[in-house]
Image (tube, rainbow, N blue to C red):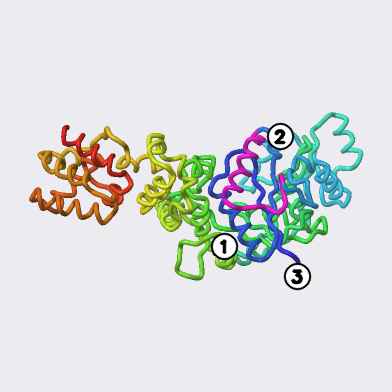
Amino acid sequence: MKKTRVRFAPSPTGYLHVGGARTALFNFLFAKHTGGEFIIRIEDTDRERSTGEFEEKLLEDLSWLGLKWDEGPGKGGDLGPYRQTERMDIYKEHALRLVAGKRAFPCFCTNEELDAKREEMKNAGAPPQYDGTCRHLTDVEREERRDRGLPESIRFSVEGEGDRTIADMARGDVSFPAGMVGDFVILRSNGLPTYNFAAALDDSLMKITHVIRGAEHLANTLRQVMIYDALGMQQPQFAHIPLILGEDRTKLSKRHGAPNIMDYRKKGYPAEAVVNYLAFLGWSTKGDSEILSMDDLIGEFELERVSDSPSIFDEAKLNWVSASHVRAGGSERYLDEATPFFPGAIRERYGAESLGKIFDILSDNLPSFSMIEHETDPFMPVPLSFDDDATAALEGCGELLKIFARSFAQLEPWDVEGIKQVIKDSGKEAGVKGKGLYMPLRAAVTGRGHGPDLTAILLVKGKDDVISALEAAGIA
């Protein structure tokens, strides 16, 4: 059996958005599930918009997601080059081969002539396709146009093409009626290949067995299949995966502000959480669990379970998935990634062990590490700032705070059982219980009226900080 080879072929004209990342992920999962190879090819023929910086960031994001490629930039391989701008001679050679075989022809029509013809066809109610003006020019007529310095592109001839049906692994059979497309350009007058020609040629020469891409590329498939046939090349199997829509049900696109992977890296989302969420955008597992590791996804991924309906990008669901990963991994898994997100005052005050304990306290509902900055107020050293609930809770509680401070000063060792006993005994001495006991203590020590488990906070802050906070709050 032929080894599976799939590719992800981004254009370095912007950052890696979630739609592209999902496509890359599906290709990667399919390759690894089938014991195949995952190839990266950079489609950088848009010279005005492509940049080396964007390519670098794209590759960084793919690496961060854990989508390690077997061939491609920085990795090499036997079937490169893996940037289209390094493959220009290949495109020219095969375009001229099609011309020699009468499957393509030089076209000398100017943009102005083409625009005028399209307008005429639209006004006549006809599809705006190329009318074949240059298809049957004689050699003499072609040379005459070259002598005049007219721009010369190469068009693929669809003459004689009939109906086609293409098997799609994600959508079933897709039919294209004859006459759906006119003669189309494969090599522009500036020597650059068009997308369909370069992609089809590269996929064949790189021995790609499966082309897994977004549903928006379905319309390109007919042209690419024609090219495969004309060159006598075996076509890959196709799988067009569903679009990702925003919550307003419009297509999620990097051109109108779609979230990109770099955004989530900067916000401190764990990579495996982002991968986990993206996998469920258009695919479903056999089981009930929605929290899966990369190994789990590889083990379960099958194209037959890809939906043919658009999926909705729901950031609230992403946050739920991410918080589940953070909760399960805790400080043992995530502390190194999370540490840079702690405020400087916290990092200076606590050592690595205490930072880990703080992280575990906060990780009950922490979708991204960037939220740490807003959740660590209870661990700040004196002087604290007080929110409205804390201020209200402290009103008239000076005597209770003095009792707490005196009792905690006598506590040895500083442990959970001792802290709980001091709170209980202090309540009896002051004649208060419930919220009247716990809320002033929380307010004095954390500056907040609500928050994580109070005993855990006291244990991490330590005796000296707790007493200092109680005394400062009592004076205030």
Lower sequence index among marks 3 and 1: 3
Residue 64, position as x, y percentages in the image: 57, 47
**C-alpha span from label 2 to label 3:** 48 Å
Q: Split into 4 quadrants, where in the image is the C terminus? A: top left
**Residue 1 disc label:** 3
**C-alpha span from label 2 to label 1:** 52 Å
To which residue does mark 2 refer?
111
Residue 385, position as x, y percentages in the image: 26, 34
Identify the magenta region: 49-74
Question: The residue under label 3 is which amino acid type?
Answer: Met
Residue 187, position as x, y percentages in the image: 77, 42
Whether 334 is among the magenta residues is no
Is residue 171 something one can see in this rendering?
no
The crowding category of the residue bearing disc 1, from other C-alpha atoms within 10 Å (few below 14, some 14 to 19, many at least 20), is: few
Quadrant position of residue 34: bottom right
Lower sequence index among marks 2 and 3: 3
Q: Relative to the observer, which residue lies in front, 186 or 279?
A: 279
Q: Which residue is painted at 50% across and 57% down in the image?
A: 276
Lower sequence index among marks 2 and 1: 2
Quadrant position of residue 364: bottom left
Q: Is residue 141 above or below residue 240?
A: above
Question: The residue under label 2 is which amino acid type?
Answer: Asn
Q: Is residue 377 above or below residue 323?
A: above
Whether 68 is among the magenta residues is yes
Q: Are marks 2 and 3 in contact (CB under 8 Å)?
A: no
